[in-house]
Amino acid sequence: MHPIKMHKSGLAKAKLSLLLVIGVPAALAGAWGWQRLYSRVTIFDLLSENKQLKTALTNLQTETRIGYAKVISQTSRDGKMWTKLRFVETDIDDPLKRVLEKEYEIEGDIVHFDALIVRFGDEVVMDGRERAMYLWRRVYGEAMSPKDGFPIEEPGVEPARYEAIGRKLSLKDKQLFWQEIWELANDPARLQKVSVRAIHGSVIYEQLRPGLIYIFKIDNKGNLYPEVIPDL
């Protein structure tokens, strides 16, 4: 091969090697940087710095009617009582508007309604008064294990009742908020780092009877309680 061509070929290979040495780590560093930037926002950042989220949480009512249940029918099969019930979740501003409606059939007449309660402290709520929200988990009867209960809300997903909170956030922040809120319940130690007073389960159980409506209410401290009225 001609000496000049050989020289040019050697230079080209040297340049290529140099680009690989410099470029690959740079590319990896760039990818790492973008990944770090993308994952930088956490639930702690949202609750401490996102004014839109704080405003939405402050707008949560201090006491609210959150839904109700009623018996559709009670029948006996194979010597066992079965209760068919309708469970309704209502709109946060309009208690007559239904945002979720499901029917369940439970063995027996004593039914448990299981909710996850999230209490926000004054570091998050702008007026300094506590607020609470709830996430319905499942419905189950006396003859069932709670883990075998019928699901109400889907874990990690924004409940329809709280869509006003999501409207204040970007899609990414909204997804992060709801995923983290559900997951915090399984990691109590993280509550020390975020302005959440508590995340805990709350179960109401009632002996259901036809002709009655079982209204569920929650106060600003996260106390979940029923009110029973005639089904007129």
Image (cartoon, rainbow, N blue to C red):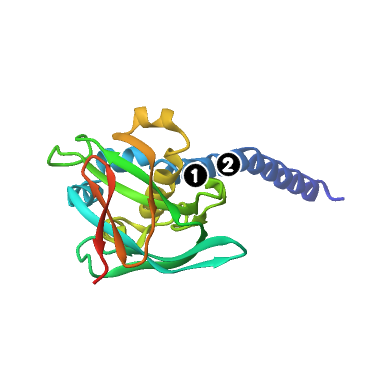
Quadrant placement of the C terminus: bottom left
Residue at (47, 37) in percent of width and height = 186
Give the residue type at disc 1.
Answer: Gln
The crowding category of the residue bearing disc 2, from other C-alpha atoms within 10 Å (few below 14, some 14 to 19, many at least 20), is: few
Residue 193 seen from this side: yes
Q: Quadrant of residue 46?
A: top left
The residue positioned farthest toward the front in the image shown: 79
Q: Which residue is mark 1?
A: 35
Query: In the image shown, does 60 or 190 lie closer to the viewer?
Result: 60
Q: What label does residue 28 carry, if any? A: 2
The answer to whether 135 appears left or right of 48 in the picture is: right
Is residue 117 depicted above or below 232 in this figure?
above
Secondary structure under tag 1 reads: helix
Of discs 2 and 1, which sits in the foreground? 1
Give the x, y percent position of residue 215: 28, 58
Q: Quadrant of residue 161?
A: bottom left
Give the x, y percent position of residue 120: 26, 39
Query: In the image shown, does 196 or 98 lie closer to the viewer?
Result: 98
Residue 60 seen from this side: no
Q: Quadrant of residue 189?
A: top left
Residue at (33, 33) in percent of width and height = 194
Q: What label does residue 155 carry, if any? A: none
